[in-house]
Image (tube, rainbow, N blue to C red):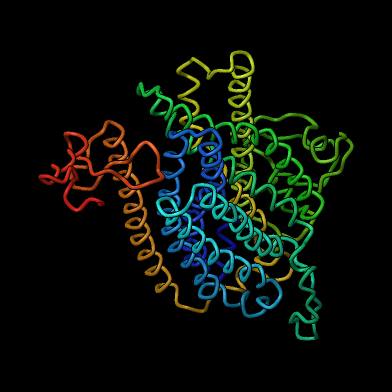
């Protein structure tokens, strides 16, 4: 069954609905690592600053908290759009199955509100709370971020391995077991794979900013600390993620064998199945291109060449991904694994130099690779979601509801128009986000050399606690002259 056949037999509104959902998901997922992991990295730097009385660490933490707030504001927009799209684009799924798996979305919504309140308190507290009180009030922030991830992954894992319900005579779910619906067979593997990916990605992206500064000759303590803390977090988690990802793929092998067949482009059920790095699945089941490694797929799946791997042809053509969809899932999976392997090498390079000399690597190539690692990590996040969603096709609820049965009856032309509007809005929103972050960077850079921002406002001080002095381009303003005969400045204390 080819992709052309699928589109020809599907409702006209299916393609624009899927394209719109794919675009908004792909856009939103780029912000998620910072929403989930940046609070933890910021608090880690904050703790270091307080524990060691380090002004540079405190300054970094305060600046990262400002970026965190801006990112959260943009995430509100993209996340809200996604929430509406579930109901507008897929009413068939939400109408029938919402009572079963909707708790996950409810948990995510509560986590979202809690995170908004805590971010406001954390930003407010920099100038108004005692240092350690301020820090401890920020500690719940990473926990709320993890709670939000819990809700979203609970909903997605249920779509992959639905359970916790029975079906009545009309095919509607009854006797819902909420606990079983939340903790599905794929929940644990998906959740930990996702969370570690978020922390790893955020660490590499933040460190990459300071790696670029290092390459441009900014070798001060501020840039060194800004690189080392997030990069160390990411480097420690990289081999952990490789193992977690391997366990997750094996869970897919056991719980979603047809999806695993798509990920590995396995056509016929067999043992001694080879592993293909990249390659394209053809309509006759042959594979064109790619690097073939004999028996490796069976070994990876069950630790033995004699492990039987289920093929795509084990189910009817209408119940499995098309060859095009299987190839897309396979390439996304292979890109993810390849980048993970390269990041392990980068982490080992960093660890080796640190253990030998207690110092950063001296090669400029290391920092070039570190600067690219952030973008590469974001790409792996995108590939992970592509693998998860495309590999599940044609099911929106695995083996219970097809995507075509859940799609909205809205006319296709209206959906294409909506798609165009969303693209324009997202370009403006992300452009504004980038503009704000760049403006903050320029302000901070001017502050670091002791100059006020040309548009007004005082630069940063060495430490974020306490009042800011009024500064000009010539430096601190001189104190006002004392009142004659009093020895004190006008308006000063008696």
Question: In percent of the image, x 45 and y 63: which residue is there?
Answer: 76
**Residue 471 appears left or right of 140:** left
**Residue 253 appears left or right of 419:** right
Q: Is residue 81 or residue 328 the one in the foreground? A: 81
Question: In percent of the image, x 52 and y 63: which residue is there?
Answer: 18
Residue 407 picture quarter: bottom right
- In the orientation shown, which residue stands out farthest toward the front? 485
**Residue 426 appears left or right of 40:** left
Quarter of the N terminus within the rendering: bottom right
Q: Is residue 181 or residue 51 the one in the foreground? A: 51
Residue 96 location in percent, x, y? 67, 79
Q: Is 15 rendered above or below residue 471? A: below
Residue 312 location in percent, x, y? 74, 52
Whether residue 385 can be seen here: yes
Q: Is residue 2 or residue 109 the one in the foreground? A: 109
Q: Is 41 rendered above or below residue 408? A: above
Q: Is 52 rendered above or below residue 415? A: above
Q: Is residue 278 or residue 434 the one in the foreground? A: 434
Residue 412 location in percent, x, y? 44, 72
Q: Is 268 rendered above or below residue 367? A: below
Q: How many marks?
A: 0
- In the orientation shown, which residue stands out farthest toward the left? 484
Whether residue 375 can be seen here: no
Question: In percent of the image, x 18 and y 46: which residue is there?
Answer: 489
**Residue 100 appears left or right of 426:** right
Residue 49 location in percent, x, y? 50, 37
Question: In percent of the image, x 33 and y 60: which residue is there?
Answer: 424
């Amino acid at each position: 069954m080819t992709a052309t056949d699928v589109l020809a037999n599907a409702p006209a509104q299916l393609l624009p609905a899927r394209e719109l959902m794919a675009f908004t998901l792909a856009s939103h997922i780029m912000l998620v690592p910072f929403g989930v992991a940046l609070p933890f990295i910021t608090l880690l730097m904050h703790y270091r600053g307080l524990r060691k009385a380090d002004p540079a660490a405190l300054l970094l933490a305060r600046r990262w908290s400002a970026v965190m707030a801006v990112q959260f504001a943009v995430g509100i927009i993209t996340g809200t759009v996604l929430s509406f799209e579930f109901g507008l684009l897929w009413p068939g799924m939400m109408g029938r199955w919402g009572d079963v798996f909707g708790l996950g979305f409810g948990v995510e919504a509560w986590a979202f509100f809690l995170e908004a309140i805590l971010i406001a308190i954390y930003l407010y507290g920099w100038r108004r709370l005692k240092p350690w009180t301020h820090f401890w009030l920020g500690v719940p922030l990473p926990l709320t971020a993890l709670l939000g991830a819990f809700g979203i992954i609970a909903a997605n894992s249920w779509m992959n391995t639905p359970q916790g319900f029975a079906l009545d005579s009309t095919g509607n779910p009854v006797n819902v077991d909420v606990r079983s619906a939340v903790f599905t067979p794929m929940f644990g593997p998906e959740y930990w794979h996702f969370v570690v990916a978020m922390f790893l990605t955020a660490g590499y992206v933040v460190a990459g900013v300071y790696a670029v500064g290092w390459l441009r000759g900014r070798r001060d303590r501020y840039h060194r600390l800004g690189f080392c803390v997030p990069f160390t977090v990411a480097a420690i988690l990289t081999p952990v993620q490789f193992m977690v990802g391997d366990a997750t793929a094996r869970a897919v092998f056991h719980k979603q064998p047809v999806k695993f067949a798509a990920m590995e482009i396995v056509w016929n059920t067999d043992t001694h199945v080879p592993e293909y790095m990249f390659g394209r699945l053809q309509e006759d089941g042959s594979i064109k291109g790619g690097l073939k490694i004999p028996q490796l797929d069976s070994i990876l799946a069950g630790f033995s060449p004699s492990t039987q791997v289920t093929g795509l042809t084990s189910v009817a053509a209408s119940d499995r991904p098309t060859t095009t969809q299987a190839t897309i899932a396979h390439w996304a999976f292979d890109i993810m694994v390849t980048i993970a392997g390269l990041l392990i090498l980068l982490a080992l390079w960093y660890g080796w130099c640190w253990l030998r000399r207690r110092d950063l690597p001296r090669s400029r190539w290391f920092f070039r690779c570190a600067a690219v690692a952030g973008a590469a990590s974001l790409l792996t996040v995108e590939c992970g979601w592509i693998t998860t969603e495309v590999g599940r096709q044609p099911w929106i609820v695995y083996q219970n509801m097809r995507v075509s049965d859940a799609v909205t009856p809205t006319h296709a032309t209206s959906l294409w128009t909506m798609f165009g509007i969303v693209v324009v809005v997202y370009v403006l929103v992300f452009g504004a986000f980038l503009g704000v972050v760049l403006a903050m960077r320029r302000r901070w850079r001017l502050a670091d050399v002791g100059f006020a921002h040309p548009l007004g406002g005082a630069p940063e001080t060495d430490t974020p606690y306490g009042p800011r002095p009024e500064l000009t381009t010539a430096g601190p303003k001189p104190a006002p002259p004392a009142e004659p005969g009093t020895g004190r400045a006008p308006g000063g204390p008696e």
